[in-house]
Amino acid sequence: MNLKKTVGLGLAFGLMAGAAQAQTEIEFWHAMGGQLGETVDQMAANFNASQGDYVITPVFKGTYEETLTSAIAAFRAGEQPNIVQVFDAGAATVIGAQGATVPVEQLLSDNGVAFDREDYISGVRNFYADADGQMIGMPFNSSTPIMYYNADALEAAGVTAPATWEEFAETTAPALLEAGYIPLAQSHLPWIFTENFFSRHNLQFASNDNGYTGVDTEIMVNHPAIRAHFNALTEWQEAGYFEWYGTGWGDNQDPFEAGEVAMWLGSSGSFGGIADRVDFNFSAAMLPYWEAVTTEPTQTFIGGAALFAMSGFDAAENEATAAFFDYLASTDNQVFWHVATGYVPITTAAYEAAAEQGHYEEFPAAEVGVQQLQLPAGEFTRGYRMGFYVQIRDVMNREYGRILTGETSVEDAFETIEAEANELLARFAQTQG
Amino acid sequence: MKRAAFGHISFPILLLLPQLVIIAIFFYWPAGYALQSSFYLEDPFGFGSTFVGMDNYTRLASSSSYMDAAWFTLIFTSLVTFFALAIALLLAVKADKVIRGARTYRTLLMWVYAIAPPVAGLIGVMLFDQSRGNITQLLGMMGIEYRLGVNYWDTASAMITVSIWKQIPVNFIFFLSGLQAIPQSVREAAMIDNRSGTRRFWDITFPLLAPTGFFLLIINITYSLFDTFGIVDTIVKGQPGNNPMTLVYRVFVDGFRGQDLGGSSAQSVVLMVLVLILTIVQFRFLERRIHYT
């Protein structure tokens, strides 16, 4: 090789390296496995192809809990990713750690991206926001609990999906049982029959405005309305109206997909999977409410997870993160994500665009979650903010399981949950010192 | 007798060094760290920690769910250790007598040892699954309603069964080699003295197997306490709910899932102390009764 050629090659490589350096690379840790993971990869590839300045690399880190734990460990070692996906129960941990993340509203405005809270669907807007409504995390895979039903079963029994629990107990359940079905099952007692139970009935779930305005929060779960609900559940269980298959999500969803259970309460994000697997006609309805508690049922809030921009990066990388968030919230991308996964769109514009495409005419069940999130809001419907909430949910799961296997009474269980949860909240408040 | 001696102290230390460094890095350092953080209440992200003294420990003592887990661990460990040893010993004694096809028979029994605990747990879950499990269906035909994940003791029995099943092969290998190490002359002498096979087993074979048995006892207790983590995790699918869990699993649930570093450290220190006491007791009291040949 002669000298000229070497210099030429060296120059060429130098230029290429220069070109590569001009692209800012950022990393994104998420918990979306399987088909959802492929959709995330597709979304990232779309973003990378849409512009030439930034390259995002999505990394699958396991379950929600594992992803959060990895991100925390990485942060403590100074190796954190630019973006991390954090689930609903971990929100207080990550939002409480001020300095670990850059609030998404601030990140966007710092980087000149237009942002208006009002663009977001009302049930989506507040869950990952602070007390003033400033969005800290970017809602990502947003879902809300809804009621799926086997349309063939309901038709055979000559009933329609119940709007209230009174209707369920008096009309729907007896008819479905008569028709040879187990009328009802559900997949997440803390999420569906506790957190969203409080929101659907606009009941206060915790002090300090559901925990948003302070850390010295006390849970108010031991409410007569929810005790009445669980007493009803045990009665229904005895009468054969309701069956509980354990704490595992899938154990409760499987009998619905097998056609044994007629109505199943799950996530609006379960839509895609059910559509793939069942061979009967199914649809969905909003989460029933107790007319005895309220005649004006309110909206539910989102579960799922949000994306947080972690701190400790230079302006260029933050700019890349902001650009990705901007792309994420764009109408085109939201419609893509909503249609591919069943998670709800986060902006009103995306919802309208999906409607215009005729998505809901084809799949009416896909719209129920969005509609439920847009019901009238109440004082206590924006969500909750409680620390060590993963453990609080564990306590709930344990006590609810004991209620439904007859090992404890509803009254004792709720006293235990409230006492143990408050002890955990006090400990969390201490860590926030 | 000739005594080997080193000229200088530094040489044996040099030889020991690699092992000591490994122990220091993988045991003493994390153990010390766990001990330290068990006295603190720490923000998960490491922004601040508060010294809380013995709070994390007193909290455990007054927590009924922790005590439940402790009781369950005791029952679990006793049953798994006992049955894993007893069944393996029975199989080994029988395999020792087999003359024709001995190799095939032994290989089949050792086979299970190659299965990783999460895979064993997964197979267990498949067998005990609520709707599709073969064992569930078999019990259903016998009129027994078996519900994994719903009923506390149904879940517990699946954990115990799978854990025993997983540990039998390793015990079997040790027992079999222990049996084969018993001199033929001793066996023949015993044969002349006593024609009862059971008596010969308890009077001659069992005492001669004691060193192997003692070693396996320690290994099995440690296995039940710690190595069954994967099985427990697979069976409860990461969410114990109203199902039983072992103390080690609780360390994971509170620390890794729940981000309560102080509380979880206190739990691991308690476990560490327990194992330490157990081992000392075993070596001081049990080992004295064992004769090594």
Image: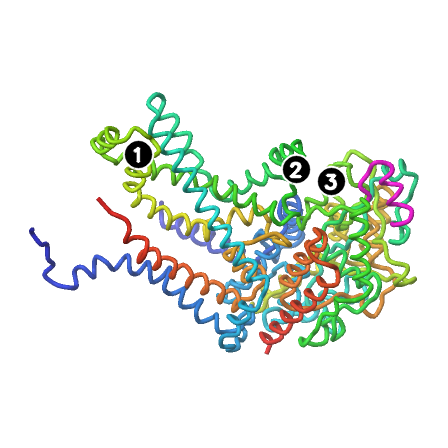
Looking at the image, is mark 3 or mark 1 nearer the viewer? 1
Image coordinates of residue B171 in percent, x first then y, are 38, 40
Assess whether mark 2 and mark 1 are in contact (beta carbons under 8 angstroms): no
The residue indicated by pointer 2 is B144
Task: Report how far apart the C-alphas of labels 1 and 2 lie in the structure.
Answer: 41 Å
Say whether mark 1 and mark 3 are on the same chain.
no
Q: Residue visible at 33% across and 35% down? A: B199
Please, what is the three-letter code of the amino acid marked with disc 2? Ile
Label 2 packing within 10 angstroms: few (<14), some (14-19), many (20+) = few
Q: Which residue is mark 1?
A: B200
Q: CA distance from mark 3 to mark 1?
A: 56 Å
Residue A315 visible somewhere in the drawing: yes
Q: Tell me the chain of label 2.
A: B
Q: Which mark is residue A255?
A: 3
Of the 4 image quadrants, the one containing the N terminus of chain A is top left
The subunit carrying tag 1 is B
Residue A57, x across and y down, in percent: 58, 53
Indicate yes or no whether the magenta region holds residue B192. Answer: no
Mark 2, mark 3: which one is toward the viewer? 2
Whole-percent x and y of residue B158?
A: 56, 43
In the image, residue B17 sits, relative to residue B170, either above or below, namely below
* Residue at position x 28%, y 57% in the image: B19
Q: Secondary structure at mark 2?
A: loop
Q: Are discs 2 and 3 less than 8 Å apart at CB? A: no
Magenta segment:
A169-183
Q: Secondary structure at mark 3?
A: helix
How far apart are labels 2 and 3 at the CA level? 20 Å
The image position of residue A122, as x and y in percent, is: 81, 63
